[in-house]
Image (spheres, rainbow, N blue to C red):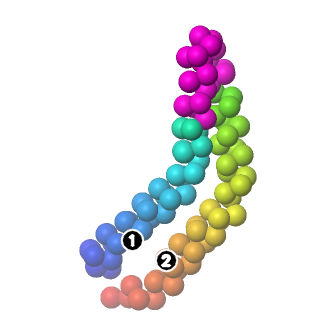
Amino acid sequence: MSPEFAISLGRQAIETVLMLSAPLLLAGMLVGLLVSVFQAATQINEQTMTFIPKIVAVFVTLLICSPWMIRVLVSFTRDIFNQIPTLGG
């Protein structure tokens, strides 16, 4: 395995992880921002009020995006397994 191949494989893995985590992180961030604005406007400082909506938003986003996420992971894994025969030195 050449160093270039290892670096390329690592880069692809990091890109895949970032692409798969982005929808969940964005949903949590957006809901957190909305709840924070609501708390600032009403001066309610309840900790569970920020935690529970974020969890629900992340789970709903996970349910919606899971077919796409599985397709991306299967495609990435299939590409790695297809490259195994070319690694013979």
CA–CA distance between discs 1 and 2? 8 Å
Q: Is residue 19 above or below residue 3?
A: above
**Near-viewer residue (38 or 53):** 38
Dot 2 amino acid type: Ile
Image quadrant of residue 75? bottom right
Q: Is residue 32 left or right of residue 87?
A: right
Q: Residue furthest front?
A: 41
Kind of residue at badge 1: Leu
Residue 52 placed where, x, y %? 68, 29
Residue drawn at point x = 67 percent, y = 49 percent? 61
Q: Kindly identify which numbered label has been placed on residue 9.
A: 1
Chief secondary structure of the magenta portion: helix
Give how far across and how far down residue 59 sits, in percent.
70, 44
Query: Which residue occupies the foreground of this view, 3 or 76?
Result: 76
Residue 10, percent from left and from top: 38, 66
Q: Report the quarter where the N terminus lies.
A: bottom left
At 54% from the left and 44% from the top, the residue drawn is: 25
Residue at 67% x, 57% y is 65
Location of residue 56 with respect to 64 vertically, above or below? above
- Residue 48 is a magenta residue: yes
Neighbour tally class for label 2: few under 14, some 14-19, many 20 plus, Cα within 10 Å: few
Residue span colored magenta: 31-50
Counting residues from the N terminus, which is met first, the one under dot 1 or under dot 2? 1
Categorize mark 1 by other alpha carbons within 10 Å: few (<14), some (14-19), many (20+). Answer: few
Identify which residue, 14 or 85, lies in the foreground.
14
Task: Look at mark 2 in the image and give the residue it sits on.
Answer: 80
Numbered label tally: 2
| SS of the residue under disc 1 | helix
Using the image, tell me which numbered label, if any, was put on residue 63.
none
Kindly state the secondary structure of the residue where label 2 is placed.
helix
Q: Are marks 1 and 2 in contact (CB under 8 Å)?
A: yes
